[in-house]
Image: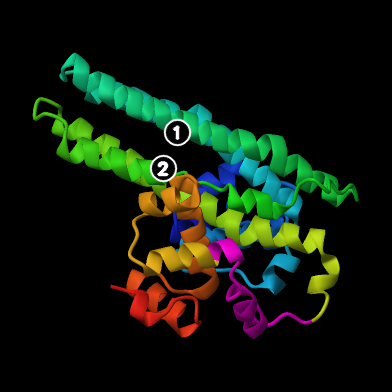
Amino acid sequence: MADLVERDFHLLGLLARFGIEQRFGDSSVETICLEADVDADTFLLLCEIYASADFRPTMEMLRACRIQDILHYLNQSHDYYVNRSLVDLANALEDLVEPCTPTQKQVIHRFFADYRTELQRHFDYEERAVIPYVRNLLVGNRNTSFTIDRFEENHTQIHETLSDLKNLIMKSLPDACSNEKRISVLLSIYNLQQDLDHHTCIEDDVLVPMVRMLESPGRFTAPYDNAQQDAQREELSAREKEILVSVAQGLLNKEIADRHNISINTVITHRKNITRKIGIKTVAGLTAYAILNNLIDINSIE
């Protein structure tokens, strides 16, 4: 365990959320996890996600994991973000903007308050709807009015606003603000954003597919290799195809939201899901994909 943490100190936060005391001497990962009643395969899978931005688990890896530990991690993460990270960041921001005008302070305070509300709403939805749903599935109680697909459709990108906050701090605060405090706040935001990226990845690439296995166990009983996984990722929903066509037509996220009468966050979520399924990120690549798959005519593109 000590060697694992030495490789990436960010894992210290992961240990804390699993309730693993950081006095492990020369004990192995398996021994430490056993003492903490944490499944070692699940713990190591999350370590891989923290260590590598490009890592995506296979279905075989997910089968070896314990979903109860994923739920515990998510629950503890919510508590950490709300009662630790955001509180510390709010205090640091308050200190940073002290030399600002009342209007400047109001703008920063309101922007950050709106973000906290957005983040809290996201976590409340998971605590109220998603986690209880999964726990009921584990004991054989299926709520037919809810599926994990609904969670994915409403899954906002909770870290996006942090990018705007960073730009406001770097570009729009007056020189009277302490440069040392500005750097400290920016480092805190970068660390929080990176942690939230891991959080989102664990939800999208671990929790969601594991819940789908609980919802439809027969679908995943056959051997499931990478080729099958890639094939499944290529299947876009009807709504995702509509969004993809709008992207290929050169529309911005707000224009796409207006066209389809959905929120910008929902557009962002759909675009993220499209990229995850087909592995293409750029507008040019998405446009080419839409043309090659007969979703749009090349002559309709300006």
x 45%, y 68%: residue: 245
In the image, residue 290 above or below residue 97: below
- The residue at 61%/74% (across/down) is 235
Where does label 1 land, which residue?
Answer: 85
The answer to whether residue 28 is left or right of residue 65 is: left
- Amino acid carrying mark 1 in the image: Ser
Return the disc, 2 or 1, that comes first in the chain's sequence.
1
Where does the magenta region start and end?
223-240
- At a point 48% along the width and 62% down the height, the residue shown is 243
Q: Which residue is mark 2?
A: 192
Q: Nearer the viewer, residue 178 or 227?
A: 227
- Magenta residues, dominant SS class: helix
Residue 23 image offset from top left, x and y in percent: 58, 44
Residue 198 on the magenta span: no
Find out whether the residues at labels 2 and 1 contact each other: C-beta distance under 8 Å: yes
Point out residue 294 in the picture as x, y percentages from the top left corner. 50, 81
Residue 87: image quadrant is top left
Q: Is residue 268 left or right of 97 when viewed as pictured?
A: right
